[in-house]
Every structure is written in structure tokens, then in C-alpha cells.
Image (cartoon, coloured by chain):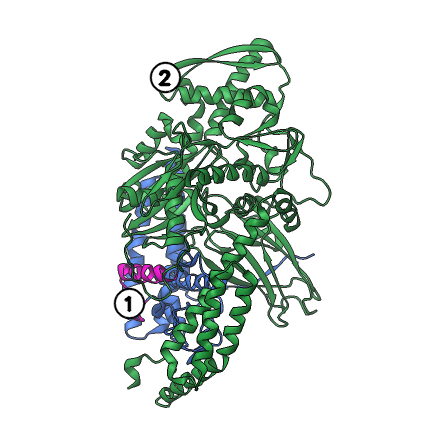
Chain colours: A green, B blue
Amino acid sequence: MAQLIQIREPGEAPLAESDDAPVAVGIDLGTTNSVVAVGTGGGADVIRDENGEALVPSVVAYAADGSAVVGELARRLMLDRPEVVVGSIKRLMGRGIADLKALAGVLPYDVEPQAAGESGMVRINVAGQRLTPVEVSAEILKALRDRAEAHLGRTVGRAVVTVPAYFDDAARAATKDAARLAGLEVLRLVNEPTAAALAYGLDQGAEGLYAIYDLGGGTFDISLLRMEKGVFQVLATGGDAALGGDDFDHAVAEAFVAERTQRLGAEVLTSADVKMALMSARLAKECLSTQETGSWVIEAGGRQTAHTLSRDALEGLIEPLVARTVGICRDVLADAEIAPEQVNGVVLVGGSTRVPLVRRQVGAFFGSEPLAHIDPDEVVAVGAALQAEALTVGSETLLLDVTPLSLGIETMGGLVEKIIPRNTPIPVAKAQEFTTYQDGQTAMAIHVLQGEREMAEQCRSLARFELHGIPSMTAGAARIRVTFAVDADGLLTVSAAEQTTGIEQEVAVKPSYGLSEDEMATMLYESMAHAGEDMVRRLLAEARVEASRVRLAVGAALNADGDLLVEGEREVIEGAMAALDAAIAGEDREAIGARVEDLEKVTRAFAERRMDRGIRAALRGRGVDELAPAAPPEDEG
Amino acid sequence: MQTAALDMRRTHELDVNPASGLVASCWSCRGPVAGDSIFCDTCGAVQPPAGADHFARLGLTRTFDIDASRLDQGYFDAQRRLHPDRFATRTPRERAFSQLQAVSLNEAYETLKDPIRRAEYLITLNGGEVVPEGCSLVNEQGLLVEVMERREELAEAETVAAVEALEVDATADFGRCVEALSIAFASDDLANAARLTTRMRYLSKFMQECRSRRARLGQHV
């Protein structure tokens, strides 16, 4: 594509990327399948294997030595060696053991008991390996990274990774950790429906009010967006982080197993049996999207049973699940105070939207034929790649997203005080003041919660920390200010400060079900043969970005205030600039840092003279009206 | 360990650059920048947000009667320049400042978009008093009685149509309040503006209750 010279406002263009800068890709890390795509200058290419297949099954098989195989090969192994294979790991991201017990029947995972000193994240046993969902996800991300590098013939170091809009803070943080473990710097976590909207807006020119209905393997999202002139503004979002095609499979598998029990009597199923039953159920579901009826086999304990299922019967089994998604659509529209007929179109995303019943129900609710021009399995990765390019090369599009769930803290009586309500545009920061409940209370437990319910126990616990050293006062006298900040990735940071003494505590919320920093550090260390190299490369890139900023600032100052230079000063500064340029061109990170310091040293006096002049000029202006520093210019003369 | 007790129901806007005055020093080129600059005139570096009011931040005149599409436009234009996505590959400092700027823009947009919050903000800007959100402090006997009557009617409404009728009524009332507010602000009558705002808070809450009751009744059909 021809390169156009672009002229931008100051501060708008990303600093120029050098040619050997690692490529940024877009990754849709799905429950069932994952996809990687790369921007091509305005468009995006989905990266396919030699057979033209874009989907990488999110399935990992482990050997006894801990080495892993990802994708189609692992998926096929599921039939013969289910005990060494793990799938649908996304459902466990940011979850604790207690979350899993909520699922009925036997789990398709071998869950390990929590060991002493371990963080609350669930651990599973695969082929004798004790693994966290973060490590398994990192294997999938590494495979995607390898695929992209092989295709592009270049190093891939950065990515936009998508997450379900309805993912809570714990699951988002876990996803980011997984990317780090895979040697990928996350440029941005983008919500899956928002990424899909970006792809539709840019590729199909969709403008107006759109609903994105995203039913994947394990998660459901519905986002309502206003799309206009390159702005993608999310008005409201909702969903269920544990509702997807997997649940359709569960419903079918349970029906098969019930039939089998009727014929053969009760039997004890292993987690491997359950995995295989779920696979048969999935085949049945997929097949019935196009066929009217079929027959499938369940095998366990050496005995086979055949089960017939018609599309009507399948629809009867999954109807309650589909109805749940439609109910959530209704709630989200009500939140945004929008009627279904005001929506210009509804876009289908995710493999589970291939199910005819889903299409019918969604179409009926919105009163229009749903759109599926872009492959629902690939559209999210395409949007992620477009955004990766926008973040690194620059773009005129703007994604404005929201928090999916309310954030708050627990107050007296187990009630939740919401600090940031759901559907608030991000980034956002809000503070609220709390006080002590008892005379002489010197510490306070801060319990951070996410969810819509009024009682703390019904919301998701994100983190607990304690603020100590509150001066002993009567109840209600201390003023503790709790600040919640959600960044553009949707990740939360909480800080608390006692206002009268200034005692402060800040926690990046490492969720109760996340990995601790120590665990993360150990994993990073263990996983990295080439990681040392990656790290050096990244630090060098960061040093160059910093140095370029300093270089640019000094150049601009020389241009603007060159008359303030004293005899010989320009030569000294330009000498230091040249030395810095040489360092930036080199590979030595420490040399870059040293030359930055040199340049700052030789420009210090010049900077002081510039400030002096600026202050004097400002004070002269102020003489007109001492009390109106913020007066608009037209009032000054 | 005790959990927190709620102190004031008011949420705060975050502190903006406390040193923002007439002139500040650019963190990047160390030269002078006007205290309310978003970008340094000399080197183009993004600055931390200054204490501009919400209207100025979005390029709007300080008035209650704002045009929704101009509000959107001002917000989008500012976000195009300041959103963290524009700074994803920049230095950590620039990313942090762009985040603070975007937080301020979102706060401004959310405040001005909603007529109730916009009115309360204007009252505060003009030195008036606003009853903090959530404090059910009603001095007006008339409003109290009216609210109770409406609630009773809603509790007795057994059909979707009956609820809708109440909703239409409340919505029209809300619209009249917005018109009256416009006049109150134009004539600098802050006391009346505050009264109208309290009334609107109640109406808005009532409309929400109507919606959830309508949804419940609708599901039974």
C-alpha cells in the first residue's frame, strides 16, 4: 500500500516505529477456538494454516515432560488420551475452586486441592502436571504467536488481545498475565463485541445504532454501540461470562447420559468419559445446524450406546439457554433506554450463533434479520488486528468502551456501596469517603467487590486489603478516601488514604483468584528460554521511546527559544543531541540512558531561562486583573 | 477488623494538577506552558489535566441549555486527541497523563449529558447548595405527598398499560422541569433551580420503578 505523508496535531502521532520493531497482531483467545490476525494498512488478514484453516482449537495436550501441543492435533488426541488434554480453559480464567463446584455433575477437569501459600487461582492436573489456567492459556497464545511469526517472517512481540465484555477484573488480569507468560506485550485488552463492531464499521461501513450479539463457546456478550464517523461508542453492555455453546453441549450430553442410564443403569463416569460425552454432544449440535436428525454414540467403561436426536429435540433442550440471552438483551436495551426497533442492526458474532434457533430468536427480538457478513468465528480477531494497527501506526477511529459491572466496597452490615456503576465510560476514576465505625478504630478492612447485587456475599470478591495506622479517634471522625481507577483495559486499581494524616495504601487489584506477583515471576522465569532475549529487546525499545521523547523536546525548545542561548551553548547542546542520536541508533540501553542524562544536564540552565521568561510574561498579563487568572483572552484586553 | 462505614454519599472528582495556575513547567521540555494547556506549545507533550470546568473541557459555553450533538462532538473531538489509545506506544509518563485527561473528559461528559447532574453541577459552580445524591432530604411537604401518591398508584397498577400511563405522565412532568430549569438558570434563580432538581431526582427514580414494574408485568403475560 502506498504510504501517505500524514500531518497531525502535536502529540497525536505515535512516535515512528523502526522497521525491526516487533509486529503487533490481534488475537481472539476463545473458549473453543482462537484466531490471530494482522493489520495490512487499513484492513486485516486472518492468518491461516497450510489448509486455509484460521481457527486454532483452544485445546492443549501435555506430554509427561511438560511440553505442550496446541490446536487440531491436541483436539484429536482428546478421543484417545483425554487425560492429557485440556480444553475450554477460558472458563476457568480468574476463577476459584468454589466457582467450579457450582457446575453440576462431574467436571471435565481434574481439579487439584489448593496448597498452602498458594493464591486462590484454581489448579488442574493434566498428564501429571499441576497447571493454572494462566499457564494453559499462555500455551495457546504462544502457538498463535508462532503461527503469526512463521507467516510474517518477523518477530511478533505485541498484541491486542480480546476478552468477553462481561469478563470481570480477575479474568481480565489473568488474560493479561497469560500474554506476558507467552512473551507478548498487551497493547490493549479490547472487548470482543467492540472489536467485532470495529470490523463491521470499517469493513461494511455500518453506521448508526448497532447491537453486537456475541455467543461464543463459553461466554455471552451483548453490546449496544453508536457507530458514527469513525467513533465506536459503547452505550451499554451485558452478558454472562459462563453461558455459551459449551452449555448447549452440556444440555445435550446430559440428555444422552440420562438415556444411557435408563438403558444400562447407573454408572460412575470419569472426567475423561465426560470429556468424550461432551465431544459427541458437540458433534450432534453442530450437525443439527444443517441436518434435521442424526444418531451419535456415547462410550464409557467399554460399553457403547447410540442416541438419536432431532433438531426439534435439540431446540427443546437449549431453548431455556437461548431465552436467557434474549432476556439479557432486553435488560441491556432497558439500561440504555433504547427500544429494540431503534436499533439499526444486530450483528452476530461467535460460533454458537450458527445455531438456527439462536438466529431465529435474536431476529425475532430485534425485529430484523441479523447480520453475519463477516465470518462470526473470525470477526473478533479482525477487529483486534485493526485496533493493534491503530495503536501502533495511528488511526482516526476511536473506541470508547464502558465497565460491564459495577465496582464497589463492602460497608457495615455486608452491604455494597457502589463507587463506579456499570456502563460508565472508561478510563474512569472516582473517590468516595468512608469513616470508622468504632471509637479508637485504627485499621480498616477494604473489601473490593464487583457485581450488581446489594449484598457483598452475592457479588464477586475481587480483593481484600487493610488500611492501618488510622489515628485513634471517635467513631465517624476519621476520613478515609477510597479511590477506584479503571484503565482503558478495564483493569482496576484501588487506593485508600486517611485524609487527616495522609497515610496511604495503593493496591493494583491482584484479584483473590489471580496469581500473586511471586507466582507470576516464578512462571516467567521457568517458561523462558528465549525470554531473556525478549526482555532485553523490550527494555531497549522502551529506552528508545523515552530518549526520542527527550530528543524531540529539546529540539522543539531550541527552535522556540533559541534566542535565550548564551555563547557556545548551542554547540554543546547539539553535541549532546548528536551523541544521543548515535546511542539511539545503537543497541546499548545503558548508553542511551547515560546520553539522555548528559543532554538533560547541558540543557538545565537553558530550561531555567525559558521558565523565567515564561513566568515574567505571564505575570505581565496578570497585572491587568490580579484576580482573574483563568479569564478568557477576549476579556483581557 | 471493621469494614468501612459510609461517610459522605458524595463521590469526588479526582484532584487535578494542584499546581495548575498561570504558568507551569512542561514535564518534557521543561519550558513554560500555560496552566490550562493540554499540550505543550513548544514540544507537543501531553500535560496533566488542569482544573478547567466541565464545559470548558468540552469546548462548550457554560449554560444549562446545551445541544446534545454539540456535547457529543466536543467530547469525541477531545477524546480523539487524548484517549489512551492515541498514546499506546508512548512513554509511561505520556500514557499516564493521557489516562488522567481521558478520565476528566469522561467525568465531564457524564456530568453534562444528564440534565439532573448538569443542573446540580451548574448550581455548585454558581456557589449554590445541592443535596447530595442519595440523601433523602425533602423539605418540601408538597413534593413528599405527591411522591407518595404516585408510588401508591404504581403499586396498584396491574397492567402494562396502566404503568405506561403513569410513566408518560412522569416523563411529561420531567420535561416541564427541564424547561423550567432553563428559565431558572437564565434568571439566576438558584433556589428554584435546586428545587426543580430535587423534583427531577424523584421523578427519575419513579420512572425507573415504573420500568422495572412494567418489565415484571410484561413477563407474566
Q: A540 or A383, which lies in front?
A: A540
Task: Check the image and report above or below for A547 versus A22.
Answer: below
- Tell which subunit mark 2 falls on: A
Q: The N terminus of chain B appears in which quarter of the rendering?
A: bottom right
Q: Quadrant of residue A362?
A: top left
Q: Secondary structure under badge 1? A: helix
Q: B35 or A98, which lies in front?
A: B35
Residue B73 belongs to the span the image colors magenta: yes
What is the number of the mark on residue B182? 1
Q: Quadrant of residue A301?
A: top right
Q: Secondary structure under badge 2? A: loop
Taking the spot 57% from the left edge, 54% from the top edge, the residue there is: A409
Residue interval drawn in magenta: B59-82
Observer-side mark, 1 or 2, equals: 2
Q: Percent from the top left, x then y, of residue A294?
A: 42, 13
Amino acid type at mark 2: Gln
What is the number of the mark on residue A291? 2
- Tell which subunit mark 1 falls on: B
Q: Are marks 1 and 2 in contact (CB under 8 Å)?
A: no
Q: Percent from the top left, x then y, of residue A240?
A: 47, 38
Q: Percent from the top left, x then y, of residue A194?
A: 38, 45
Task: Check the image and report above or below for B92 versus B149.
Answer: below
